[in-house]
Amino acid sequence: MQRLFIAALAATVVSLFTLDARAAAALENVKVSYAVLSAAYMDHVTAMDKGYFRDEGLNVEVLRIGGGVATPALLSGQLHFSSSAGSSLSAAVRGGPVKIIYTNLSRPSYYLVATSANITTAKDLIGKKIVINSFGDTGHLATLLYLRKQGINPASVVFITVGRNEVRLPALMSGMVDATPLAPRELVKLGLQKQKVLADLGKEIQLVWNGVAVSSKLLAENLALVERFLRAIVKGREYARLNRDEAIAIIGKHDPSPIEGLRADYEVTKSSMTDEGWLPDDILREEVAIRAELTKVAVPANPLGMYDYSIVKKIYAQCCSKVIMSGVNGNVIMSGWKDDNPDIITLLQQPRRAAACNRVRAPVTPSSSKTSIGCVTPLTCRAPKFFNWTKSSTSRALAAVSKIAPGAASSCIRAARCVV
C-alpha cells in the first residue's frame, strides 16, 4: 500500500512538473531593456512579480542595458521593447522608426549633485566633468535642460559616459568627476549631504522620462503583442501605486539599496507619475522641439507622429471603472478593473487621479461649500482579482464618503451603477 502511495505521489509530482514545463513553453518570450530595475520601473517589476506578464502569455527576458545601447538594439529588431523612452524619442526625432507608446513618469526624480564643496551653483559647473550613464538618456537630457534654463551653454561642461550605475557611482565618489544626476535612493546610499545637491531636477523640468518605446515595425505587425505587454504593465503600475509597502518590497528584490533609500525612491517616483500613462500634446510638441535643437536636427513636420498613446488609453478606459469624490480631506476614489468579479470595490486615497479623470460625471449635492462631490459614471464597477479586495472595503469606503458628505454615498454609488 505504501509503495502504491509513493508511486502515485511520484506520478503526481512528475505530472505537475510537466504541466509547469508546458505552461512555460507556451509563454511568448519578449526581450525588454532596463537601465536599472529601481522604483522608476516599479510598474514593470510589479508586473513581473505578480505574474501579470504571465497572465498575458508573456515571459519577459530582462536585458540590463542603458538607453544609448538599447535604442539601436530596438531599431534593429534585437529588442521587443525598451523602457528607455527618452533615448528612443531622441532617435525618433532624428528620423528613427520608433514610437513612444506609454509614459510612466514625466518629471525626472533626479537630483543634480556635486562632489566638491566648492561647487555650490550651476554656474560653478562650467569647465567641470559630469558623469552620466549614456548620451541621450534621461539623466543626460535633464541635466542639459537644467543647464540651459540656468543660462549655461551645455557645451561648457564635459559629459562622461560610463554605461551603468555600478560604474558611475564609484567614479563620482573617487573624485574623478565633479557632478552627476542621482536618484533619491542613491543619495541615501552614498550618504551625501544636502549642501551638495545643486537642484531637484523634477521641480525644474518636465519631459518624457520613463515609459515604453517600440519599433514602428513591431507596432504595425503585432499590435496584439504590444497591447498584452502594456496591459500587464498597467496592472503592475496600479497595484504598485495602491500597495506601497508591498511595492517597496518587490523593488527591493531587484534593487539592493537600503530600505530608507527604497522608500524615498518610491515616494518621489509615485509623485512623478503621469495619471494614465500619457501626456498632453503641448508637452509632447515642446519636448520634440527641444530634443531637435539639442541634437541639431530640424524639428519634424509631425512631432506628434512619434507618439502613439492609443493603446494605453484603450487599456485605461477598460480597466478604470471608478467613482471619484473630492472632499475637504482629499479625494476618495473607489476604483475597479473590469473583470468577472462585479461586487467588490475599495477605498483609495489618490488626489492626483481625480483631476485627470475625464469620464461622465453625475454630480451629487455637497454638504458644505468646502466640499465638492462628483461621481464618475463607469461602464461597470468591477474589481480585479489581483487587488485582493473584500466586501469590507466597500463598507469602509461608504463610511468614509459619508463623513465627507453625509447622505451622498448611496446616491453616488447609484449614479455610478456600482453593484454593492
Image (cartoon, rainbow, N blue to C red):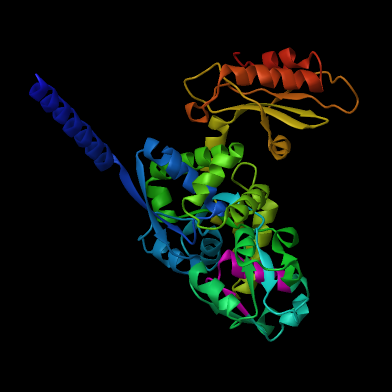
Q: Would you say 242 lies left or right of 349 here?
A: left
Can residue 89 be found in the magenta stretch?
Answer: no
Residue placed furthest toward the front: 2
The range drawn in magenta is 130-147
Q: Is residue 355 above or below residue 45?
A: above
Q: Is residue 351 visible?
A: yes
Query: Where's residue 143, x and y in %?
Result: 66, 70
Residue placed furthest toward the bottom: 127
Query: Where's residue 69, x and y in %?
Result: 44, 68
Q: Would you say 114 lies left or right of 258 here?
A: right
Query: Where's residue 265, x and y in %?
Result: 62, 54
At x 61% / y 59%, what residue is drawn?
185
Q: Is residue 211 above or below residue 159?
A: above
Q: Is residue 320 above or below residue 397?
A: below
At x 70% / y 59%, what residue is drawn?
202
Q: How many marks?
A: 0
Q: Is residue 85 above or below residue 352?
A: below
Task: Name the quadrant of the N terminus.
Answer: top left
Task: Name the quadrant of the C terminus.
Answer: top right
Q: Is residue 227 visible?
A: no
Q: Would you say 123 lies left or right of 273 here?
A: right
Which quadrant of the view contains residue 363?
Answer: top right
At x 81% / y 16%, what residue is drawn?
406
Query: Where's residue 173, x and y in %?
Result: 59, 76
At x 39% / y 59%, what residue is drawn?
63
Q: Would you say 87 lies left or right of 52 here?
A: right
Name the foreground residue: 369 vs 9.
9
Can residue 143 be found in the magenta stretch?
Answer: yes
